[in-house]
Amino acid sequence: MAERPVIRTMTRADMDFAIGLAAAEGWNPGLSDAEAFFAADPEGFFISELNGKPVGTISAVRYPGGFGFVGLYIMVPEARGKGWGMALWAHALRHLDGCTVGLDAVTEQEATYTRSGLASFYRSARYEGTGSGETPEGLVPLGQIDFSRIAAYDRRCFPADRREFLRVWLGAPGVTGYGLVRGNRLAGYGVIRPCLEGHKIGPLFADDGAAAEALYRGLSAAVPGGKFYLDVIEPNRAATDLARRHGLEQVFVTVRMYTGPEPDMDKGRLFGVTSFELG
């Protein structure tokens, strides 16, 4: 009988291998993504090994309240087509038993995930731009805003509470983040982080197009002359309009898929996806 890989839960050190695979696939991960991802669910990352050699990874982050998200699903090229990836997939889904599971699929794999029981809900597009401009007046550095206010706003725009992830994400090296306060109320916040190539904006959550515009301008100004990326969802037309108004170029498309009903979140406030790997 042919040998088969052994699947185990990743350690924090294993996360660096997973991020390396993502980089090799051209996914352009953030320089500190491993630390923040692991904080989201230390039991939700799995690695497949053949004779002690890693051959595949997957994340299956279980958020509070019955929501899970799958990402980092990658087999090394020589391990593909052997059924090992399906074993890794099944292992990950067992960790998410009882959850509504989401993922962002490249369009070429949409049919594959449909056969696995997921349904498509909407498309997202990644846009590329170059940082420029001045920081608008009225933006407040996130470090000056109480974290509980940021976490509460984030929860309106994401299907679950993810404050353990956010603490690390917002405080990672090289990250710039702003909030927009109207009166006494937080009306949005946004973050831009360094990646292997350029930077990525995400999340970018805002009450309306005007708030998103101010936050976008501040984040763009944080990387003058540098390349950056912004991922927007098609259901929020104002987000697409923002990207096009600033001359950003669409570079690829993904499909948001779920195993059950679409989770509750305010897509009208979602002007920039946090991460295609964790939702």
Image (cartoon, rainbow, N blue to C red):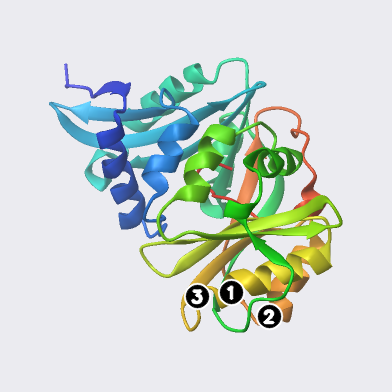
Q: In which quarter of the image is the C terminus?
A: top right
Q: Nearer the viewer, mark 2 or mark 1?
A: 1
> Which secondary structure, mark 3?
loop
The front one of 51 and 265 is 265
- Taking the spot 67% from the left edge, 69% from the top edge, the residue there is 216
Horizontal arrangement in the rendering, residue 236 relative to residue 6 (left or right): right
Tell me whether the residue at label 1 lies in contact with that at label 3, contact meaning CB atoms closer than 8 angstroms.
Answer: yes
Residue count near mark 2 (Cα–Cα under 10 Å), binned few <14, some 14–19, many ≥20: few
Provide the residue designation for mark 2. 246
> How many dots with numbers?
3
Element type at mark 2: loop
Residue placed at 75% from the left, 70% from the top?
A: 213
- In the picture of the structure, the residue carrying the numbered disc 3 is 223
Whether label 2 touches label 1, CB < 8 Å: yes
Q: Nearer the viewer, residue 240 or 131?
A: 131
Q: Which of marks 3 and 2 is in front?
A: 3
Residue 51 rendering spot, x and y as whole percentages = 13, 26
Q: Residue at x 65, y 29 (%)?
A: 259
Which residue is at a point 38% across and 68% down the rendered structure image?
Answer: 197
Q: How many neighbours does mark 3 have within 10 angstroms: few (below 14), some (14-19), or many (20 or more)? A: many
Establish if 49 lies above or below 277.
above
Residue 221's x, y, as percent? 58, 77
Q: Would you place residue 262 above or below residue 146 in this image? A: above
Q: How far apart are marks 1 and 3 (CA)?
A: 6 Å
Describe the element under mark 1 as helix, strand or loop: helix
Q: Mark 1 points at which residue?
A: 220
Placement of the N terminus among the 4 image quadrants: top left
Q: Is residue 28 above or below residue 161?
A: below
Rendered location of residue 152, percent (x, y):
72, 38
Q: Which amino acid, mark 1?
A: Ser
Q: Earlier in the sequence, mark 2 or mark 1?
A: 1
Q: Which of 175 and 125 is in front in this view?
A: 175
